[in-house]
Image: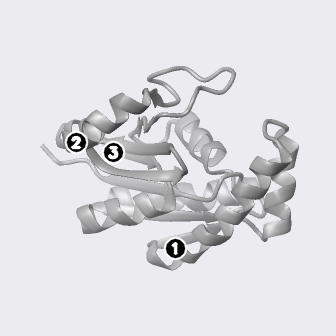
Amino acid sequence: MKKGKLIIISAPSGCGKSTIIGEIMDAGKLDLQFSVSATNRKPRPGEVDGVNYHFLTDQQFKDLIAENAFVEYEQVYPGRYYGTLRSEIQDRIDAGHNVILDIDVRGGVNVKEQFGADALSVFIAPPDIPELRRRLEKRGSESAEAIEERVGRAEYELGFKDRYDYVVVNDELPRAIGEVAALMEDFIKA
């Protein structure tokens, strides 16, 4: 049986990565299974445990770190962790499915280093920082302080883009979706 491949998609918050991934998954043209990340943050309205994230307590997350259960994890903000459970990807890849990861930029670099040529890494970038700020404000889900924290984080995260196989600028959503889908399709077929 042919092993599946791993696709890593990373981006600063507000760059449209979840939308791009969702559109590609909904199109159903590629054999993709979504890896659900784990986090110790509280669910946002409408988010479902095991679907959007595995929502864990602080202690559960720390216990899993101690058990080496993550292929990667990161403290993205003070006290806020995100990670990818090893069990979420390895069994699926071994069964011949392609797995897509939606993870933070440092985690993406770490996973790419572990999986090498068996993984495709794509960085979704904003057209510029003012547009990113506008998108975050348009969400209406966070305070001005939280938006400034995310914008500051995004400026830092943009420094990692050259460590990815490809960078796609999301200046026009349909074009960005098409570009990312084409990269995935080429990688899966190779």
User: Is 168 situated left or right of 144 in this image?
Assistant: left
User: Is 163 situated left or right of 97 in this image?
Assistant: right
Q: CA distance from mark 1 to mark 3?
A: 24 Å
Residue at 54 percent across and 65 percent down: it is 123
Q: CA distance from mark 3 to mark 2?
A: 28 Å
Q: Which residue is mark 3?
A: 98
Above or below — where is 142 with respect to 115? above
Above or below — where is 159 with respect to 11? below
Residue at 82 percent across and 58 percent down: it is 133
Q: Residue 18: x and y, percent? A: 61, 44
Element assignment for label 2:
helix
Q: CA distance from mark 2 to mark 1?
A: 27 Å
Residue at 53 percent across and 29 percent down: it is 52
Q: Which residue is mark 1?
A: 160
Q: Which residue is mark 2?
A: 66
User: Is 111 situated left or right of 138 in this image?
Assistant: left
For residue 189, which quarter of the picture? bottom left
**Amino acid type for the residue under numbered disc 1:** Phe
Element assignment for label 3:
strand
The disc, 1 or 3, on the residue closer to the chain's N-terminal end is 3
Image quadrant occupied by the C terminus = bottom left
